[in-house]
Structures are given as C-alpha cells and as structure tokens.
Image: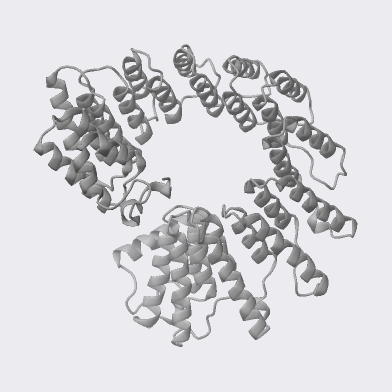
Amino acid sequence: SNKEVFALLDEIDSGSIGGSTPVGNTVNFNQAISLLAESENIWAGSRAEDILNFMLELTFKRKNRNAIPNIVTFNSVIAAWAKSNHALAGERSAGVLKKLEDLHDMNQLEDVQPNRVTYNTLMNVYAKASEREDSVHKAQGCMNKLIDLYEKTRDDKYRPDIISYSTLLSAWARSGQPDAAENAETLLLKMIEDSKMNPKHSPQPNTICFNEVLYSWARSGHPNAISRMRTIFQLMYDMNEAGHTTAVPDTRSFNILLLSFANSLRKDSAQRALVLLDEMEQMSVNFGKPDAISYNTIISAFLKKGDMESGMEILDGLLARDDLKLNNRFFSSLIFSLSETDAVDAPAMADTIVKNLLETPEYIVDTRICNSLINCWGRANVDEGPHRAMDILQGMLNGDYGKALPDVATFTSVIDIWAKSGQENAVTKVEEVMELMKGTAGVSPNTQTYTAFIQAVARSNLSNKARKAQEILQLMKDDYSSGNRDARPSLYSYNAVLNAAEFTFGRDVYLEEAFAVACEVFDEARSTMQPDHVTYATFLGVTAQLMPKSGIRNDMVQLVFRRCCMDGQLAPLTIKKFKQAATEQQFLDLMGNSSEDDLPDAWTCNIRNKML
C-alpha cells in the first residue's frame, strides 16, 4: 500500500533497517519505486533514486541477495524522474543509466543491461524537457543507440518500437527547433517506407505519430505549414483506404489543423476553419468528430477577427444542442478568448455568458469560470474594470455565483487588476481585498499575491511607498517562516520593492528613506538569491534618481556595474540605467573597448532566456 511505501522511505531515511537481517526484496522495492513514479511528485525521482542506492548498499555492502536491482528497478527510477517534471530530470535520468552501464561493465550486475524500455523512458524525459535546446538531440541520441544495438545484436529487446518513434517525434514537436517540423516529417516518411520494406520488424506509424508531425508543423510558423499539414492528412487518408486502420485521423488531428487555420493571418482564416469543422461533421464515424475544443477554436477565431456576431451565433447553436455537452473548461477558455479581443463590449458579453449559465440548470458555474470573467474585466482597460472585478469577488463570497468560491487565484487577480489600474485609491482597495482574503477559510496569500500587493504600492503616489513596500515584503517573509510554503519571496518580490524606491518622489526625508530601503533590499537580494538584470537595472535607477552626484555615487555605480558584469546580467535595460547613473567619462572607462552592440559573453551569459 502507499502507507507501507512511505513507511519504508521513513525507515530508509532513519537508517533503521538493513544490517544482516533481510528486509524487503527486489519486488517490494520495485513496487515502491513504481508507486513513486505514479505519484508524479517533483521529488519522486529523487526518492526513487534513494531506494535504488539503498538496494545497491544492501546488495554489495550488506550482502543481502534478496534486494538485487534488476532492469525493472532502473527503468522505474528513470520513469519516476520522467514523470516528476523536475528541472534536472534529464541529467539525473542519464546518471541512472550511466550507473547501470558502469555496474554492468564491472560485472557487478552482469545480468542487468539497458533495454528498449530504458531508452524509450529516457527519450520521454528529454521530450518533456522541451525548453532545453539539446534535449531533442539527446532523445535522437537514445534512438541512435537503440538502432545501433539492434543492428549489432539483432536482439529484439533493442528493436525500436512504435513507442520509440512516437516519443522521438514528440521530442521534435516540442523542441522549438527551426528544423523540427522538417525532421519530424522526414522521420515519419522513413517509418512509412521502412514498414513497407520490412513490415515484420518496422513499426507502421499510428495516429499518435501523425499527430506529433502535425503539431510540429502547427508550431513551426512556416509559411507553408498548412499545406504540409494537408499533405500529411492525405497520407493518413491513403493509408486508411489501403486498410491500415492504425493511422485514422482522430479529433486531435483535426483540432491541430483547425487551430492552424484559425491562427493564420489570412482574412478568411475563421471561415476556412469553419469549413473544416463542417467537413469533420460529415465524415465517417471512424474518423474524429468535433468536440468542445474544436468549437472553442472556431468561436475564438471569429472573436479574434472582431466578428462577435458570428462567434456568439455559433455558441447559441451549441447551447441548443443535446448531443454535445460543453464543460466548464470550454466556457473559461471562451471567456479568455473574449478578453483577448479589442472589443469594448467583450466584458459585457462575458457577463452575459456567465449569467445565462447561472440560469441553465445543467451547467454549474465554477471558480475557474469566475476567475476568467474577472480577468476579462481586468484586461478590458476600462475604468469600471477593477470595480467589476471587485463586485464579482464579493458576489462569489456572497454565493451569487452558485457554488463558485474564490481561491487564491481569484484574490490575486483582483489585486493585480487594482495594481495596474492607475486609480488613486488602488492601494486602499488592495488592502480591502487582503482583508477579505484573511477572512476566507482555506485561502492564504501566495508569492504572487504579495508581489502584486507590493506592485500596487510601487505604482501609487504614496510618499512613503518604499518603506511600505518593504513592510509588505517583511509580512511575506514572516508568513513563509510561519509555515505558509506558498508565500516564499521571489526575486520579483524584491525587484518590486526596488521599483517602489526608484520612483519615490517628494520631500528629502522620503527620498532618503527610499534610498536606505533600496540598499537594504538590494543587499538582501544578493545574499539570498541570484539578482537578475532587472535587479541591477532598478538599483542603478535608484542611484541615479536618489543619490546626489558625488565621488561616493561614482564608487557605488562602479561597484554595481562590475558586480552586474561578473554575474553575467548586463542587458540593454541595465545599460540604459547605467548611463543615467554614471558620468559620461565613467561610462566610457567602465565599458572599456566594449560597445553596447558588442558586449563580452561573460557580461551577458546569465540573462534570462538570453533575451537581448
């Protein structure tokens, strides 16, 4: 049971088991690792690897031959990392494979070798790590290794199967590489050709494989993407007519193409998507039929083109149908699409949709729908937006929206809307929301809540806003220390306080206070986390705005600039603020032989996403 698994983990942590007495066996430990993998917790991979290491200790140091790890053990540990979504899952999974290979090469586990499942699972890790530039190439390396092992041994345990290919295609689809779509399509065509030449040993592509290639083209931004997707669809039709029923276009296939039509720049993009939707309706029962996502895509396409009437007409038709049940995700996504339009009546339309849902017994308005409605009003950029957001929040507390109760996202959204409103009473309203939140059972502010509160103060006209922002940061730290693990201060929180200091105006007493706050917060940020280019830029802005020109100011600017360069955080924004804080000669001296357009890599290497 899960309870027994966690009891076992506790015993491993305490070191209370082991010794000469056999405890557990390979099957028990493998079951524990498998349950950890199924939990999908971010710490599951690390705990699974702890069990593997404990099994190795029992086997080699304590001579317990009942707990020898087998290939299922190693594959399950890699699977735990794959499902954890941990930032280091790829590196740690590769480390598990390397450990297995080393133990085998040293004849300590001579009967345990990596197999197809090992490499498939590792490919899955890399497919999920799409933000890493090298992930897809590492996934390709796993496939190359499998093919090489199979060609050398002709052992079926190494022969790539449909999972191998679909996982590699998924890695290409999510990689964001410029040539991802071309590489995915090339791999798909090779699968088709190989399956014709050697049908017994080469897997034929299935619907999942085709969908990954379609998705690759949909994400490519290529001008001929829709044409290529049409060609791939034709391949699926041809294979189906030839009797290959594993490659039938399903609902996801059509939804990918629908989205590409809807997002194209053509004036008739929404109408073309609607034509495709009608084709889906008329197709054979073996093919994919439209679902809620299909119709949401169509309606959103018309809304984004400014054709509210057509979008709402399609929605009215859907609501009148008995054969298609729309879920709350559909309505929240629809309201989000409304919020992305420039139509002044979009929030009012969203209000009407929610009102109609409340009056329809078969639909239940939930928190997600209300949150989408709040955000729709927030993005409308109208004076009444913050007030309507506040009304909806109060209505949720009063039960006006059925069983929809506000969660932390609800309160945080309302705070953020007030923070960005530019209205004079924004800080007072944010404080009211915080009080309402305190009185709501089961809801506590998180990092985003406190940071939005600080930003509201930073954007205000309060003379003492720097000190007030610092006090909110301290509240946040105290809340976190008291056990609210969701309230951990982030770098954005510290940057927001620095921003409050930079834009403090008024009497000298407030300017001096703001500078003191900025110095304290900047030093704390440097000692507790890694400052980014915004941190350095904002503090240089503080120096320029609040510190009189003097030799001391020049020394401060020099110190901050050099620390910024050492941390690899010299971005255009930082240079702009550096120019404001430094004298013209100091700027030239510190830049040396470097120009703004040709900076040393060491000065810029750690800027987030290298967005220069």
**In which quadrant of the rendered view does residue 596 lie?**
top left
Q: Nearer the viewer, residue 331 or 611?
A: 611
Q: Which residue: 67% across, 64% down?
A: 165
> Above or below — where is 424 with respect to 282?
above
Residue 444 at x, y percent in the picture = 36, 31
Colour scheme employed for the rendering of this structure:
one colour
Q: Position of residue 539 (x, y in %)?
A: 24, 36
Q: Is residue 478 shown to the viewer in this render?
A: no
Residue 173, quarter of picture: bottom right
Q: Is residue 485 above or below residue 351?
A: below
Q: Give the image quarter of residue 514.
A: top left
Q: Residue at x 48, y 64 (%)?
A: 33
| The C terminus sits in image quarter | top left
Q: Residue at the location (56% across, 58% down)?
A: 127
The total of numbered circles placed on residues is: 0
Q: Is residue 469 left or right of residue 279?
A: left
Q: Residue 177's x, y, as percent?
A: 57, 55
Q: Residue furthest left?
A: 551
Left or right: residue 37 versus residue 252 is: left
Q: Can residue 74 be seen by looking at this rendering?
A: yes
Q: Is residue 310 left or right of residue 411?
A: right
User: Which residue reaches farthest bottom?
Assistant: 107
Residue drawn at point x = 81 percent, y = 52 percent: 248
Residue 452 rendering spot, x and y as whole percentages: 36, 28
User: As displayed, is residue 170 above or below residue 468?
Assistant: below
Does 565 sit left or right of 136 as displayed? left
Looking at the image, residue 152 lies above or below residue 56 = below
* Depth check, front residue: 591 or 386: 591
